[in-house]
Image (cartoon, rainbow, N blue to C red):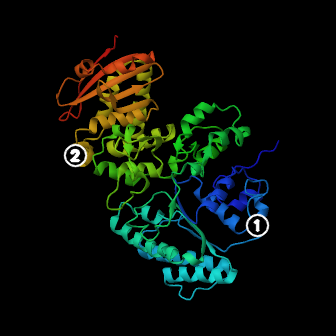
Amino acid sequence: MQLKKLPIGIQTFSDIRKDDYVYVDKTDIAFNLIESYRYAFLARPRRFGKSLFLDTLRNIFEAKKELFKGLAIEDKWDWDVSYPVITISFANGRIDSREQLDKKIISILEENQHSLGIECKDIDSTDICFRDLIIKARQKYNQNVVILVDEYDKPILDNIDEPTIAKSVRDGLVNLYSVIKGSDEYIKFAFLTGVSKFTKTSLFSGLNNLKDISLQKQYGDICGYSQNDVETTFKPYLDGVDMQELKSWYNGYNFLGSDMYNPFDILLFIDNDFQYSNYWFSTGTPTFLMKLIEKNNYFLPNLTNIKVDEKILDSFDIDNLDLEVILYQSGYLTIDKVTNQARGGLLYHLKVPNKEVAQSLSDHIIDFITSTDTTKRLNIQNTIYQALEDADIKQFESSITSMFATIPHQNYTSSKIAQYEGFYASVIFIYLQSLGFQIIGEDAKSEGRIDLTIITDKNIYIIEFKVDGKGDALQQIKDNNYALGYTNQNKDIYLVGIDFDTNKRNVSKFEWEKYQS
């Protein structure tokens, strides 16, 4: 049987349908969205299928019935009515100034004028031209207008490490988006997508009627591939693949619906003959995240134990960047579970979604904070991995010592992050997380809080860190009986105390023993 082509890099719905590419049907979700809301907003990480979903909506409103044969919406939608659609996309290219933004907007509005057969009276004023376009489209087609905005926030995110430019660009976008609220009587439906949700006091100040569906359960699967999609639609393409391994590498994103795969990963995994690689991560380098980690002296083991409240929904502010929220909205963290707070309100527990992100993000952080040569880093990672698999504690100690020895001297003097006490534990943690083991930082147990726990297939390592002789690390593990919480896992447990000397910039004391219950 001839398999359908894979839609790698194709975000145009009509091309996918006409040229017989694989399509995971999202039109039932699209219909529910259109019927439920007039103004809606969706936040998802990059390359998650937002652009394709937006283009699907465009074709629905333009009544391209022939493209929807056999899809869920075919018998639900009134194909006799066509609506004028204005599309705005900042997905392509980079904008580095307010001047570039205004030129980009004018170019986008000119494209819409051409497609709708309309001329604006003031093409040099972004807000006046946009409103004129909306009104004239309504008059010409005798139907209210649909507005679809793709990657609404990208011009700001492109400049997030340059606050002055970011604010200027934000003001330009506010000038554009405020037209939507002021044109309510002419609008049938408006949908905006992006990576982040900026605070209502900034970018969304004029759009308080916008419904955020990002964490509504019924829209949890709006973008991406579910496990069911992979096991049905893509089953013929994955013959012989270990599905559990595939899941550990690429599944795990959760927006309160199903656990999801990033489509980019699945398509490239198949296209590259089942080669496990960092497909999604390699498409973007989170440099501004590295700068934020350094600026805040962030204690990296905390990445495994993050809890945030409703700020995750609405707290991206240029003047107050919250690392955990940025990591979530960018796709480097995802929702693990949601619990109720005793004082009321929800608490979102976050986690690294899968092996791809854990390894790639860890490697990127290692290279940034240690400036270690890539070849040396890989050698150390491989040696540590094998030492922990084999319970070779002496080799583990030797590898950690080598790890710090490879960090250039100037890194300790020029890097702010290397000058705080948590640096040593952070380096070890991020190396360990890059190996793919289950790592728990700041592991809270009834007996106390363990600095770091490593869980492999056969062994468990409980690690306590000290700096400059401030306490006996191994004795603390024993006194607090930290191992007690793991005795039911039927694995060998090793207690490891590590002391660092900030003058020598390396391990000064390494003690361990095998736990005997």
Q: Residue furthest bottom?
A: 121
Residue 266 pos. (x, y %): 62, 43
Q: What is the distance, in whole Å, between disc 1 and disc 2 at their CAs? A: 67 Å
Closer to the camera, 269 or 206?
A: 206
Residue on which the image places disc 2: 413
User: Is residue 19 left or right of 247 when viewed as pictured?
Assistant: right
User: Relative to 111, is 9 above or below?
Assistant: above
Residue extending farthest right: 1
Residue 343 appears in the figure:
yes
Which class describes the residues within 10 Å of circle 2: few (<14), some (14-19), or many (20+)? Answer: few
Disc nearest the viewer among 1 and 2: 1
Q: Are marks 1 and 2 in contact (CB under 8 Å)?
A: no
Q: Is residue 415 visible?
A: no
Q: Point out residue 20 in the picture as x, y percentages from the top left corner.
A: 77, 54
Residue visible at 66% across and 44% down?
271
What amino acid type is highlighted by mark number 1?
Trp
How many marks the image carries: the answer is 2
Query: x%, y% of residue 352?
Result: 45, 40
Q: Residue at x 60, y 48 (%)?
A: 221
Q: Earlier in the sequence, mark 1 or mark 2?
A: 1
Judge left or right: residue 78 versus residue 256. right
Q: Splitting the image into 4 quarters, where does residue 76 fall?
A: bottom right
Q: Secondary structure at mark 2?
A: helix
480, above or below 82, in the image: above
Q: Secondary structure at mark 1?
A: loop
Q: Note whether 146 is above or below 502 in the view shown.
A: below
Give residue 79's mark. 1
User: On the rendered structure, is 325 left or right of 53?
Assistant: left
Q: Amino acid at mark 2?
A: Thr
- Indicate the quadrant containing the N terminus: top left, top right, bottom left or bottom right: top right
Residue 115 versus residue 94: which sits nearer the camera? 115
